Amino acid sequence: MDGTMNDRIQRLIAAARAGDIYPKTVHVEYDAFDENLSDPQRIAKRLTEYMAAQPCAFSDDNELVGMVRFDGSVEGPLFPRIGHRFFAQTRDQYYCKPQENLCTFEWQHSNADFGKVINVGLVGLRAEIVAARRNYESDIHRLEFLAGLESMIRGIVNRSRQYAAECRRRAADPETAPARRAVLLRMAANCEWVPEHPARTFEEAVQCLYFCFQFQPDSIGRPDQYLLPLYERGLADGTLTRDHAKELLQELFVMIHGWTPPCSKNADKGGESHFAIGGYTLDHRCAWNDLSELILEAMMECDLVRPQVSLRWNRLTPRSVLRRVLDAERHDKNKRIAIANDEPRIADMTGRRGIPWEQAYDYITVGCNEPAFQGGISLGGNKVNIVRSLVRTLDGRRAEALECRDFDSFYTLYEQELHHDLETALNWSNRFNMLRSRDCNVLTSLFMSGCIERATSVTQGGASRALWCAVFMGSTNLIDSLAVIRQFVYEERRCTMAELISALDADWKGHEALREEILRDGRFYGNGDDFADGVAHRFYRSVAAFADGRTDFFGHPLAFGNLTGYNPHFAWFGAQTKATPDGRVAGSALLFGSGQSDGKDRSGVTSLLMSVAHMDPTGVMCGDSIFNLSVDEAVVQNDESFEKLVTLVETYFREGGLHIQLNHVSAEVLRAAKKDPDRYKSVRVRVSGFSAYFVGLKESIQDDVIARTEHKA
């Protein structure tokens, strides 16, 4: 931590790292008659009673208040889904359980529209509820939902007033020091005003964000944009200093870090909360500003693992900003920083998916680098074994495959199986989301765009700003396998299709020479080679052709990605998948992300980056996609080579690269950490859009991180 950090913040950080900073929950006995109420009325009534019963706890170091956890006795925030009855049933049946070796049910991230509640307050949301009622005067179910939302507003306002009263009670204590008394009275005034009313100052805005985060503890969106007007106003009129603004942000980050309790299996992971800085403004300008810089500075001084942040780069982003963020990344032992490219993502949103610029420019990053919107939900939660489509072609349609006389004929056959599996995956995704939709949510729905206007729960399609995505495991394996078939069977005729299939059936046993030849001479993706890159383009065009004109059952256009999240889906699917033409043996893990592994990227880092940048000309993979780049530690430590790395990343983005995150811990150190974890407990790595302590990762994920090629700039 920076030695100049405020002592108060240092104590808060120390407390957050040492244990659970959240108050213990107080059990509430609910009236059994509540079960006769409609779902939204029951949920709102019980949530209000629950919040009123919880302690208004905070330390003498706090200037922001509002921490509360929900115990699962009633449907609480959307992200953790605690208390959502039907979600729990679905999770038990499908979560982390591959279906047909094709799909698995996964979590979903989302983001409350914190900027909106800061700007209009709960009074503004209440006015929207009153207006929405006029559209549903004869629809009792929607009217009940709106009544539930309005009841929730009363419960939240009551909770903020409880905190105001506790601040005033402590201020009245004769033993309270005068300086602390003044702070407590200011805190009380803040809680009496926000979140009920629009924030008037930067401090009120951060208090509103701190308080409302409890109702959707996921991403905080684009705070450098929605907090900027009050930040600039405070600096201009002298009511705010930059140092105090930084303190408030750091206290916010402490709370976010602490929301995931130390007892959680995800306590060391950064993907629990993820937000964005930079990007575009509505009027097409670069959005990086002094508050963006302050947020980054505030984060880097805090020795915390959450939240993590992505810079949204675009063609207007100055090189100095990219360098500043990469410099912070190379010095961040907690590995909280990634970078995404606005250009391909916004082009896909406004083009293929038909989202207007006025919404697309404002996208954010959540979880493990999933794109979403403020007040929107990422309708992912479906990991797909894309390699299965090729296995089905070579096994289920073997006779037809053996008769193919050229690669075009074979690919036409394969594309049929690809579209079959994509259709099946879409059906599974719809099934998962239909099962989720049985729950009603009134707490988070209050803060989600569209739920008031549509008078519909976010779980049931109420969110108007939603992005659907299914995520491929093994896309690099698939592209390489298709490239091997094209090269070895049809163009260079080094083996027949029958010989290749026999080798796969035997898991390469007795065919070791062919496997060695493939691994030695194969023209694999990631080498800037038009041959393999052309296969990638063809594959993604096929995916885009399937997605064209289709939606999920909520009506959202289709997109795809390739990240894995916390769970090793790539290993689970791989364990059930036979040998593949790229030289992979049966049962071994599939690859994830947009990169290459196992030394198959032989032509250096520039060639790899260009292959990834040009990978998908259709934009269909602009969903939940990541690219891991492992570089030699000396590259980031040496200033001269670091400058080259900055130029390389900038070139990658200008060529169309979607995302990048760096690892610069050597493979030797990671292998040593596997053997002697006690000596390497502090080593953190970027995994799949999130960071974690290496020794705490599942072995399959550790092996994937080690296998990534290490590059020298």
Image (cartoon, rainbow, N blue to C red):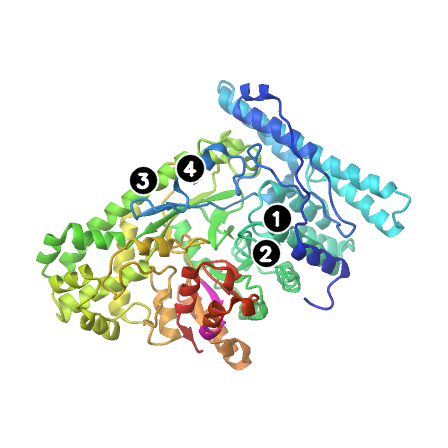
User: In the rendering, at what x and y percent does residue 604 appear?
Assistant: 37, 76
Name which residue type carries label 1.
Answer: Trp
Which residue does the image show at 72% across and 57% down from the upper left? Answer: 247
Q: Is residue 604 among the parts visible in the rendering?
A: yes
Regarding mark 2 in the picture, which secondary structure is present there?
loop
Compared to residue 104, the image places residue 238 above or below, namely below
User: In the rendering, at what x and y percent does residue 505 appear?
Assistant: 18, 59
User: Alpha carbon of mark 2 to alpha carbon of mark 3: how far?
Assistant: 35 Å
Compared to residue 675, the image places residue 441 above or below, namely above
Residue under label 2, please give it.
Answer: 306
User: Alpha carbon of mark 2 to alpha carbon of mark 4: how far?
Assistant: 28 Å
Mark 1 crowdedness (10 Å alpha carbons): few <14, some 14-19, many ≥20 = many
Regarding mark 3 in the picture, which secondary structure is present there?
helix
Instruction: Confirm whether the magenta stretch covers residue 667.
Output: yes
Name which residue type carries label 3.
Answer: Asn
User: Alpha carbon of mark 1 to alpha carbon of mark 2: how far?
Assistant: 10 Å
Name which residue type carries label 4.
Answer: Thr
User: In the rendering, at what x and y percent does residue 489 appear?
Assistant: 14, 66
Residue under label 4, please give it.
Answer: 90
Which residue does the image show at 25% across and 75% down from the upper left? Answer: 520
Q: Reading the chain from its start, which is encountered first: label 2 or label 3?
A: 2
Residue 427's tag is 3
Which residue does the image show at 49% across and 32% down from the upper left? Answer: 85
Mark 4 crowdedness (10 Å alpha carbons): few <14, some 14-19, many ≥20 = some
> In the image, which residues are magenta?
660-668
Instruction: Confirm whether the magenta stretch covers residue 454.
Output: no
In front here: 300 or 606?
A: 300
